[in-house]
Image: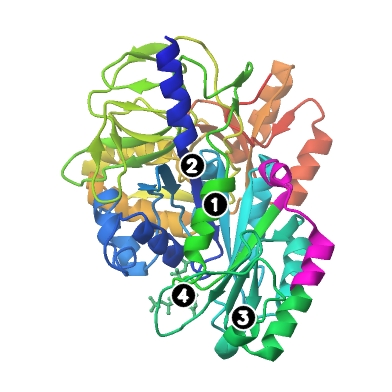
């Protein structure tokens, strides 16, 4: 038993599970690709972009991704670097899929946030940071595109601190930018790293414990040497020593500068990341806190993806292992369904292929073939009843009625709607007392995806008719008569969700507020978490 425990500790200590997040175009894909190159997971640059990896690791099922040039599906890529097992969870960049990204962030232990040095903080950066703050997720900032004429680094740090409301601590410092960009000084390791735009790799590191060393002049010239000394003195005076505890607590973000496309500053980022980033962390469940070191297995589903391979009808549930050891063919307790199930072909996401695995450890993400057992937020245990908390579910903001264009395919349509909405990309409502199917999403693009997938995966043709609602909220009341009356008077605005829960669809904020004022006995809920502690 003790030996087993040692093994578990070792496996946990080896793992880093994180996501790279950014506003679209800041360089997330490029940085991911460089990380994979270092990890030996891919051999050539451009493989991520050209979807070669995606083809194997995730979805080539969705033509729409290619047509629109966006990454819709969240994928997981695992690779080893210097004895560390890195699980990198990719997130869709498009804002209409933000919900998917937010859920993925519940399955990581830390994030790397890429910021474009020219554009600074952008809209998605702010929203993503809010999600990180909800769970105090440790963040490392990578300021990218130093090869372009960007903002002054001090101004940029101020902007990031102000806008993202997080304290920063630079661990590297740039020497100029744009065409004058000469490299960075690594404040953490006290090394000089020179940029050579033609070489496409970092120049060899020059240890430089003392910046007064005249070798600095030789390397970067007198003017820049003096500027760097001045900058570093200022930084060290202002920021002091790096406080790793504050980083792990989510209140302090270390900052690196570089250029992903030139593979500059990326290795340093990766190596520091491995040293300072958190190993798999404890997680809150409805009844207590679960430690990764517990002997019994537990995990939760944060994403469901249908038909990765269009020849098969299976869905894949992505399960984050949170404690114990996950084993193939062992029966686990599905808490919501109260039944025991086992998995004969669980797989991990090693970058080049899907590998069936025999076991997995905390921090790992396992792909489970699913024939309809799973919903987002489902928990598997070795018998204990609890749910992992903090998995967000958002009130949809765009509503459309589903119009069936092919009555011969009604059954397929219903199945398709149920399965696709189980994946969490959209929510399905049925008009109260009627048959009208309503889909609610957070972004318009999801309707296109649903329409496309219903046609391609289920053979069902649909059109959507926009409905004038702005928000869905769940309603309940202690007074059942009052609830009945409300439903009767407002029947045009009432629907049922997939679980038969009553929902009020409000046309506008004004209507919603008016109904709340006029009906003090009715409670209006805006669910924010699938499972809550309590
Ligand atoms: P994303 O996943 O965050 O959306 O960004 P992505 O990596 O796709 O990068 C967006 C654009 O920025 C790409 O250019 C990419 O080549 C470029 N880029 C990434 N890192 C750097 C950098 O360090 N310096 C500069 N100057 N550019 C960088 P693109 O023109 O959209 O695509 P491509 O034709 O280069 O593939």
Q: Tell me which numbered mark, 2 or 1, is placed earlier along the sequence.
A: 2
Q: Which label is found at residue 273?
A: 1
Q: Which label is found at residue 471?
A: none
Please report the bounds of the magenta region as a residue range: 232-252
Q: Is residue 510 above or below residue 178?
A: above
Mark 2 or 3: in front is 3
Q: Position of residue 303 (x, y in %)?
A: 43, 39
Q: Marks 3 and 4, Cα distance to the nearest angstrom?
A: 15 Å
Residue 157 located left or right of residue 410 = right
Count neighbours of disc 4 (C-alpha within 10 A) and say few if under 14, some if 14 to 19, many if 20 or more: some
Residue farthest toward the left in the current orientation of the protein = 311
Does the beta carbon of the residue at mark 4 sit less than 8 Å from ligand 1? Answer: no
Residue occupied by mark 3: 215
The local secondary structure at tag 2 comes to strand
Q: Which label is found at residue 203?
A: 4
Q: Marks 4 and 1, Cα distance to the nearest angstrom?
A: 20 Å
Residue occupied by mark 2: 16
Q: Tell me which numbered mark, 3 or 4, is placed earlier along the sequence.
A: 4
Q: Marks 3 and 1, Cα distance to the nearest angstrom?
A: 28 Å
Q: Tell me which numbered mark, 4 or 1, is placed earlier along the sequence.
A: 4
């Amino acid at each position: 038993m003790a030996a087993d425990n040692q093994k578990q500790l070792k496996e946990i200590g080896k793992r880093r599970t994180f996501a790279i997040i950014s506003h679209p175009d800041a360089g997330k894909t490029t940085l991911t690709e460089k990380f994979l190159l270092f990890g030996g997971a891919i051999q050539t640059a451009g493989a991520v972009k050209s979807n070669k990896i995606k083809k194997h690791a995730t979805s080539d099922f969705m033509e729409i991704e290619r047509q629109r040039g966006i990454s819709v599906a969240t994928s997981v890529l695992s690779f080893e670097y210097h004895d560390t097992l890195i699980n990198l969870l990719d997130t869709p960049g498009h804002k209409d899929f933000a919900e998917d990204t937010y859920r993925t962030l519940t399955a990581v232990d830390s994030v790397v946030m890429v910021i474009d040095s020219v554009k600074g903080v952008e809209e998605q950066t702010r929203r993503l940071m809010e999600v990180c703050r909800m769970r105090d997720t440790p963040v490392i900032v990578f300021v990218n595109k130093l090869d372009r004429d960007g903002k002054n680094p001090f101004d940029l740090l101020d902007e990031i601190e102000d806008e993202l409301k997080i304290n920063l601590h630079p661990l590297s410092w740039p020497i100029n930018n744009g065409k004058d960009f000469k490299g960075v000084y690594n404040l953490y390791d006290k090394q000089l790293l020179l940029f050579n735009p033609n070489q496409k790799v970092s120049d060899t590191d020059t240890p430089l414990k003392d910046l007064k060393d005249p070798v600095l002049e030789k390397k970067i010239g007198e003017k820049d040497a003096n500027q760097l000394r001045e900058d570093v003195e200022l930084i060290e005076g202002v920021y002091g020593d790096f406080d790793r505890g504050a980083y792990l607590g989510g209140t302090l973000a270390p900052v690196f500068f570089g250029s992903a496309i030139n593979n500059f500053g990326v290795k340093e980022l990766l190596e520091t990341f491995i040293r300072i980033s958190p190993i798999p962390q404890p997680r809150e469940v409805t009844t207590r806190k679960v430690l990764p070191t517990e002997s019994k297995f537990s995990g939760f589903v944060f994403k469901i993806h249908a038909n990765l391979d269009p020849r098969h009808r299976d869905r894949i549930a992505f399960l984050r292992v949170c404690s114990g050891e996950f084993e193939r063919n062992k029966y686990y307790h599905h808490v919501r369904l109260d039944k025991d199930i086992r998995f004969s072909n669980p797989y991990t996401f090693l970058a080049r292929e899907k590998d069936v695995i025999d076991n997995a450890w905390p921090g790992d993400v396992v792909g489970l073939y699913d024939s309809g057992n799973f919903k987002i937020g489902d928990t598997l245990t070795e018998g204990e009843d609890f749910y992992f908390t903090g998995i967000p579910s958002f009130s949809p903001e765009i509503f459309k009625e589903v119009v069936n264009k092919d009555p011969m395919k009604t059954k397929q349509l219903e199945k398709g709607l149920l399965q696709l909405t189980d994946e969490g990309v959209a929510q399905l409502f049925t008009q109260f007392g009627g048959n009208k199917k309503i889909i609610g999403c957070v972004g318009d693009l999801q309707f296109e995806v649903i329409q496309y997938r219903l046609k391609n995966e289920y053979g069902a043709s649909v059109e959507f008719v926009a409905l004038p609602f702005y928000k869905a909220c769940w309603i309940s009341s202690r007074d059942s008569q009052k609830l009945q009356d409300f439903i009767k008077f407002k029947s045009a605005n009432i629907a049922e969700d997939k679980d038969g829960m009553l929902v009020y669809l409000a046309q506008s904020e004004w209507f919603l507020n008016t109904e709340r004022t006029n009906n003090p006995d009715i409670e209006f809920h805006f669910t924010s978490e699938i499972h809550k502690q309590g």
